[in-house]
Amino acid sequence: MSSVLRIGNAQAFWGDRSDAAAEMLAREPGLDYLTLDYLAEVSMSILASQREKDPTAGYARDFVEVVRSLAPYWQSGGNCRVVANAGGLNPAGCAQACARALEAEGCRSLRIAVVSGDDVRAAALAAGRGEGPEERVQSFRHLESQLAIADIADIADRLVTANAYLGAASIAEALAGGADIVITGRVADPSLVVGPCLHHFGWRENEWDTLAGATVAGHLIECGTQVTGGISTEWLELPDPTHIGFPIVEVSADGSCVVTKPAGTGGAVTVATVKEQLLYEIGDPAKYISPDVCVSFLALSVEVLGSDRVRVSGAQGSPP
C-alpha cells in the first residue's frame, strides 16, 4: 500500500469545463483517483424537473461525455479510478449511460458501481402525513437554530426534491468491491475524497482525526480551481489564469495532505489560496459538519513545502 494517496479534482460544478478530466490525466497519468463534483442544491431541483418530464433523466448528462473522453486513457493502461456525484436523482440511469458510452468506445472491462439512498422525498412526505412507523413529523427544523421552518403538510405540493447527504462509507465499499467508476447521488462533497482514503488506508470509521484530515482535503479540492487561485483576491496577479490548473491532494495515512496542481498549468497553490478555500462555505470553524465526522479547523497548520505545494495538517475530528 502506498503511503500517499494522490487524488485530483476535475469538476467543481455542473457546467464546469468538461475536457479538464482528460487533460489532467494526460498530465498526471499516475493519479490514484479523480473526483468530479456536479451537485449543488439548485442542481437537484433542476434534475428533479428534468426527471419529471423524462423518467430516464435526472442525472448530469455531461458526465457521460467526460467518461467517454477518458476511454483512451483506460485503453492505454491507465488505472486511475473515478468517483463522481453526477448520478443526481438517477445514479443507476447515469451508470447505464456511461456503460453504453464506454462500450461504444470499445472499453468494456471497467466496473461501474452506484451509490443511492439519498433521495428521501417520499419518506419526508410520508412522515408529514403520519404514515409509517414514525410519529408524524410536524415541521422541518433549521439545522443550527432548531427553529421550525415549515410544516411538511403545508409545503408538500411544493416539495420538489429532498435529499440526505450520504457519507464516504458506501463509496469505500464500492471501491473495495473493485469498482473503477463510482457514481453517487447526493453525497457530501468532501466524502468523494474521504471514501477513497477509507478504502486505501483501511481507517476505521471512528478514527476521527484522520477522517477530519481527509474531509479537509476533500473540502480543499471540491470546488476545483478555487484552491488554485480561482477565488483569489489577488487574481490579477495569478500566472496564466486562462489555463488555471485543477487541484490535486496528496493525502497521507495520518490524514494530513499536500495541495498541489499539475506542472505547467496556470494559477497557483499558495498559503493564501489554500486559506481562502478553507474558509469557503463554512459556518462554525470549530464544527464543520459532514456525515463522516465533525471537523475543527482551529488547530490547522498551513505551510509551504515548495512551489505550488502547500501542506495542511492538524485537523481534529469528533463524531458526526
Image (cartoon, helix red, strand yellow):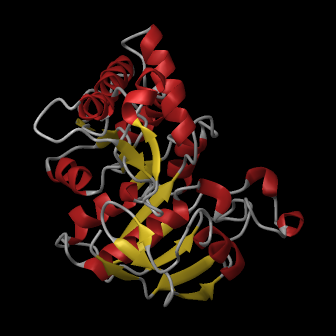
Residue 156 sits in quarter:
top left
Query: As rendered, which of 309 and 315 lies closer to the eye?
Result: 315
Residue 169 sits in quarter:
bottom left
Q: Position of residue 211 (x, y in %)?
A: 31, 73
Most extreme residue toward the right, as rendered?
236
The total number of labels drawn is 0
Residue 112 sits in quarter:
top left
- The residue drawn where x is 63% and y is 74% is 274
Instruction: Name the image quarter holding the C terminus.
Output: bottom left
Q: Position of residue 32 (x, y in %)?
A: 36, 59
Q: Position of residue 30 (x, y in %)?
A: 41, 59
Residue 211 shown left or right of residue 85 in the figure = left
Residue 304 shown left or right of residue 236 in the figure = left
Instruction: Name the image quarter holding the N terminus.
Output: bottom left
**Vertical comparison of 267 with 188: above or below:** below
Is residue 39 shown to the viewer in this render? yes
- The residue drawn where x is 55% and y is 51% is 24
- The residue drawn where x is 69% and y is 72% is 273
- The residue drawn where x is 51% and y is 87% is 298
Most extreme residue toward the left, as rendered?
133
Is residue 3 shown to the viewer in this render? no
